[in-house]
Each structure stands twice: as C-alpha cells, then as structure tokens.
Image: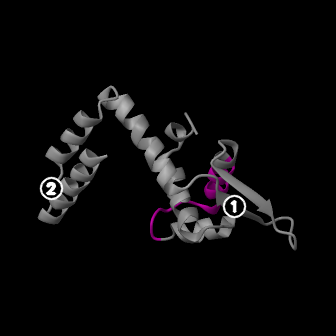
Amino acid sequence: MKDIFPSITENEWLLMKVVWEKGTCTAADFVEGLEGVKDISARTVRVMINRLVKKGVLEFEVDPRNSTVHHYHAKYTQEECIQEKSQNFKNAYFSGDGSLMLATMVKQEDLSEQDVQELISLLERRKGD
C-alpha cells in the first residue's frame, strides 16, 4: 500500500468515501453519491474511477448481464487508507514525530470535555500496552 495514497486527490478521496459507504458501486452510483457533496460531471467521475483503478485502489468486476457495466469495490478499507495517509502526513510535515503531530493538533482543535476525556482514555490504554 506504500506510496499509493499520497497521490489520491481530494476529489478521488470523495469517490472512495462513496464506495466505502455502499460497498460496491457502478459509475452511476458514484455520480449519485456525490450529489449534494461536490458538483462533478459524470464524465469527470468516470475519469477519476479509471485513475483509481490504475492506482490499484479500486477493483472491478464486469456485470455478467451487461458487459458495459462495471461493479467497483475498494481494494483497501477506509481504516487502512486513513492509517496510511496519517503516516504519510506525519512523515511529511512532522519529520515522523507522532507526539509533535498530536500535540499540535490538540492545541489547535476546539475540543469538548467529552473529546478530552476520550483522548485521555486512549492515552491511558496506550500506556498500558
């Protein structure tokens, strides 16, 4: 999975969110899934789908009843992709220093008391590992 996700554009990431939500999508499903989220033409959606297939992020099967229809699914889970993007972000902007990244984000976020307690709980569990 190395070096795949840094090249995914913001719009391609939106397509991935659609397929993660639905499980399997046709090109029409992607277009429908983006309605109200992003104004992207059906033609552009098809171009982005092809790019994601070439990048190895999406896979497809041809519909047995209609060879012009492809059913796309994600090769990786959303969690795997987020983990990879987070790792790349940490390496690119924080020289691989996770504590600096976390401290910067905590300082900049407007966290509720519940958010703070959840972070404390995560850190306490991590400390026990």
What span is colored magenta in the figure?
36-50
Marks 2 and 1 sit apart, C-alpha to C-alpha, by: 38 Å
Locate residue 88, reporting x and y percent. Answer: 43, 35
Identify the residue at horizontal 20%, vertical 39% (top origin).
Answer: 104
Q: What residue do we see at 49% from left, 37% from top?
A: 6
Magenta stretch, overall SS: helix
Q: Which residue is mark 1?
A: 72
In this picture, is 94 found above or below 53?
A: above
Residue type at numbered disc 2? Asp
Q: Nearer the viewer, residue 39 or 17?
A: 17
76 or 109: nearer the viewer:
76
- Give the residue drawn at x 50%, y 45%: 9
Q: Position of residue 97 (x, y in %)?
A: 29, 30
Total numbered badges shown on the rendered structure: 2
Q: Quadrant of the N terminus?
A: top right
Please tell me the numbered disc located at residue 1. none
Q: Disc 2 designates what residue?
A: 110
118 lies left or right of 10 = left
Label 1: which secondary element = strand
Query: Hey, which residue is sitting farthest top in the picture?
Result: 95
Which callout, 2 or 1, points at the residue further toward the start of the chain?
A: 1
